Image: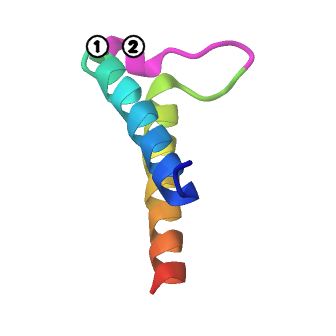
Amino acid sequence: MQPQTETLLALWIEARTRFTNQLTKLIEANLQKRLPPSPNSVGFLIRHIGDVECFLLKMYLAIAA
């Protein structure tokens, strides 16, 4: 059985790879699209995912230090 950190890292890499592969197919016109009734656009959600990843990494590094 893998240690928890290795398991989480493997899952994150898989999810990140899938996400990154989808970004290469995205066209600029789609960044403004929304799924009603949500007020959030595709562009906003992409930025939000990046912000959350950055926040969690900083939090993890602060705990690990």
Near mark 1 (Cα within 10 A), the count class, few <14, some 14-19 or many ≥20, is few
Residue found at x 51% / y 71%? 60
SS at circle 2: helix
Q: Mark 1 sits on what residue?
A: 27
In 3D space, how far apart are the residues under numbered discs 2 and 1 (Cα atoms)? Answer: 6 Å
Amino acid type of the residue tagged 1 in the rendering: Ile
Near mark 2 (Cα within 10 A), the count class, few <14, some 14-19 or many ≥20, is few
- Res. 30 mark: 2
What is the x, y in percent for residue 2? 52, 51
The magenta stretch spans residue 31: yes
Q: Which residues are magenta?
A: 29-37
Amino acid type of the residue tagged 2 in the rendering: Asn
The magenta stretch spans residue 57: no
What is the x, y in percent for residue 23? 32, 23
Which of the two residues, 22 or 14, is positioned nearer the viewer here?
14
Which of the two residues, 11 or 59, is positioned nearer the viewer here?
11
Instruction: Quadrant for residue 34, please give it.
Output: top right
